[in-house]
Amino acid sequence: MGNACFSHCQRPHQHAGTTKEQGAFVSIGSSSTTASETGESYNNIRDGLSADDAAYHDEDLFYDSDAYVWFDAFENFPDEGEASFSLSIPALKMVRTRLKDSFPNDRNFLNDDYIRSMACQAYAKDRNPRRAIETTIEVLSNIMEWRDVQNVSELPHLVSMAAASQAQLQRWKVSQSQLKRAQNLVKFLNTGSVYWHGMTKDGRPILWVRAHRFLLPAAKILLLVQEDENLVDEAQRMALLLLADLGIQHGMPDGISNVCVICHAESLSAPTPNDANKFAAAAAAAATASRSGPILELLTKGYPNRIHQVWITTPVSSTSTMDEWIQMQSPLLPDELAESLIICDDDDDDEEEECQERLAEEVLLNGWEDLPAFLGGPNQDHDHFYPDSSSREGSFLEFDFYGMKERLMEQRMEYEERMRRE
């Protein structure tokens, strides 16, 4: 399933020395013991995890269901030179309880698959795959704290405000400042520049970025919000955070913890370096960020390990500029993001056909029939469901936000049912 870790991660088997970060065995008695009975309390579990005298060697470790559960972030089952690491059920329960207690209003954002994928990450400095469970909890807590600061969980309410009648707004006692933020948010959504539609062959929801819509001329954007450029950045930032959350919470089948992004540079040719910067930033930021905001902060603090691949379909005339940008920016990007960028040229017939074939054969769930018309395919759904409505007057929601959410949930359930049948 790509480069993410789900129920378990395969890593090279290492015969390393014992450290206190590697965890401890905790005796739980017979195999009939229930998960709630295993540690007596989470404090006891934590004490077992952090015991300085805890010791084990990979070559000597075997799982004995009658006696022990490994309470580190990983369980290790040596098998012919490879080790399999996964978050144990009691440890997963412990992580969930800690996060639920600290962030009761946003506890559903982190599902079990994402917690497991984060637990499978290596340490940044020594690349040791054994990230301690306390480190995992700290990383996830930092994500949740960042979400609190960004008020991410409140964004769906802004969409409701923009779609509400005057009577509803009065009943909800919506302030003028709240209403203004809601209107600016939906004005960006109405461009139809970023939306969820379809899935990859391995079940990842696809976030589409229509670059020529995303990079609206500055005068047009400023006219939309009738204020200053800071409000443009805020509107884009809010919209992308809102869409990222929607896909994560409603579009991921069981076992999936990251997404695919396809960014199309339709109608863009020979961009200036500044335009290329914005365009590439839009592609990388599609899951999270804003046009000129702190993109790296958003990617690393808000949504780490959430992007599986970023496909960029771009005219050949702009490819060299894009390559230069990627080479220049890659050292600053998280490793998983830098490695996920794929440029697909489509300027001439041969290149366009190759790009179409790659997307149909490697990415899109139903192959050619899912390829959108703007990429030369037969699928008309994109412009039908997500037209550019930014030219319409008014501050109301034209973008089919709730229809997109419903389709996202339906495709997830259909994929899960398809997997069960197979």
Image (tube, rainbow, N blue to C red):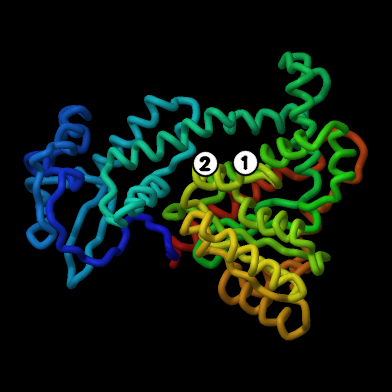
Amino acid on which disc 2 is placed: Gly
Which numbered circle lies on residue 241? 1
Q: Which mark is residue 308?
A: none
SS at badge 2: helix
Any part of residue 76 in sight: yes
Query: Which of the two residues, 190 or 335, is positioned nearer the viewer here?
Result: 335
> What residue is disc 2 on?
302
Image marks 1 and 2: residues in contact by CB distance under 8 Å: yes
SS for tag 1?
A: helix
Between the C-alphas of marks 1 and 2, the distance is: 9 Å
Q: Residue at x 67, y 66 (%)?
A: 322
Give x and y (percent) for residue 170: 78, 15
From the image, state whether disc 1 or disc 2 is nearer to you: 2
Q: Which numbered disc flags the more N-terminal residue, 1 or 2?
A: 1
Q: Residue at x 77, y 83 (%)?
A: 349
Judge from the rendering whether residue 298 lies leftward or rightward of residue 182; answer left or right.
Answer: left
**Residue 95 occupies quadrant:** top left
Q: Quadrant of the C terminus?
A: bottom left
- Corner quadrant of residue 320: bottom right
Q: Residues within 10 Å of mark 2 (few under 14, many from 20)?
A: many
Tell me which residue sits at (30%, 64%) in the image. Answer: 10
Q: Mark 1 belongs to which amino acid?
A: Leu
Residue 37 appears in view: no
Q: Quadrant of residue 24?
A: top left
